[in-house]
Image: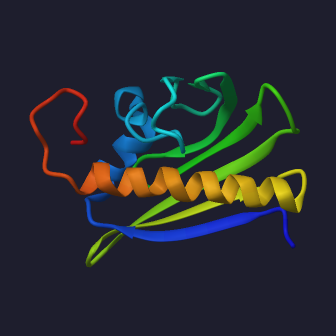
Amino acid sequence: MTTDIRIERVLKATIERVYDAWTQPGLLTRWYCPNPALALQVDADVRVGGEYVVTMGPYIVRGRYTEVDAPKLLEFTWQWDHEGGPSQVRVELTEVADGTRMLLSHTGLSSPDDATGHLEGWELELDRLAELVSAPPTGHATDPA
């Protein structure tokens, strides 16, 4: 089995709305954890060389943005504080007839078991992302644009 993950989804939202959900900390805190019961805090300086820290209850993941091309591309390193070595995440967004095609690649994971665990986590998170971006805006500041 591979140590790389590739997930493709079409989200029923504009490319700008999906990109905002990936880059605005107020929106990230609404979906960026596989377990919604955990307290979630996100700090993100979305620019090439900028850093992010995501605290999911007792777990912390951090990294640095290596490519940023709004609203089409984000690439960043991924490093858990408690285990494993660094890996790389790439999110490519493309406008399509039904909304936005999102291709997420997470490469360089330490083992097939690590890849399986991350795949399960990403799938849960991306379900929450899809719900967030497809919901009608409520007028709150943390709504996707």
Outermost residue to the bottom: 97
Q: Quadrant of residue 31?
A: top left
Residue sitting nearer the eye, 18 or 125: 125
| Quadrant of the image containing the C terminus | top left
Across and down, in percent, residue 76 comes to: 65, 41
Side (left or right) of 90 relative to 145? right
Residue sitting nearer the eye, 47 or 27: 27
Give the residue displayed 72% in from the left and 39% down from the top: 78
Residue at 78%, 25% (x, y): give it. 81
**Residue 114 position (above or below residue 20):** below
What residue lies at 54% left-to-right and 45% top-to-bottom? 34
Residue at 44 percent across and 43 percent down: it is 22
Q: How many marks?
A: 0
Give left or right: position of 61 versus 16.
right
Q: For this view, does 43 lie left or right of residue 100?
A: right
Residue 139 appearing in the image? yes
Q: Residue furthest front?
A: 37
Left or right: residue 131 compared with residue 102: left
Q: Position of residue 20 (x, y in %)?
A: 35, 42
Residue 14 vertical position relative to residue 46 in the rendered view, above or below: below
| Farthest left residue in view | 139
Quadrant (top left/top right/bottom left/bottom right) for the N terminus: bottom right
Q: Nearer the viewer, residue 67 or 53?
A: 53
Residue 55 pos. (x, y %): 59, 23
- Residue 74 position, x and y percent, is 55, 47
Asked where in the image residue 97 lies, by quadrant, the reply is bottom left
Colouring chosen for the image of the structure:
rainbow
Residue 16 appearing in the image? no
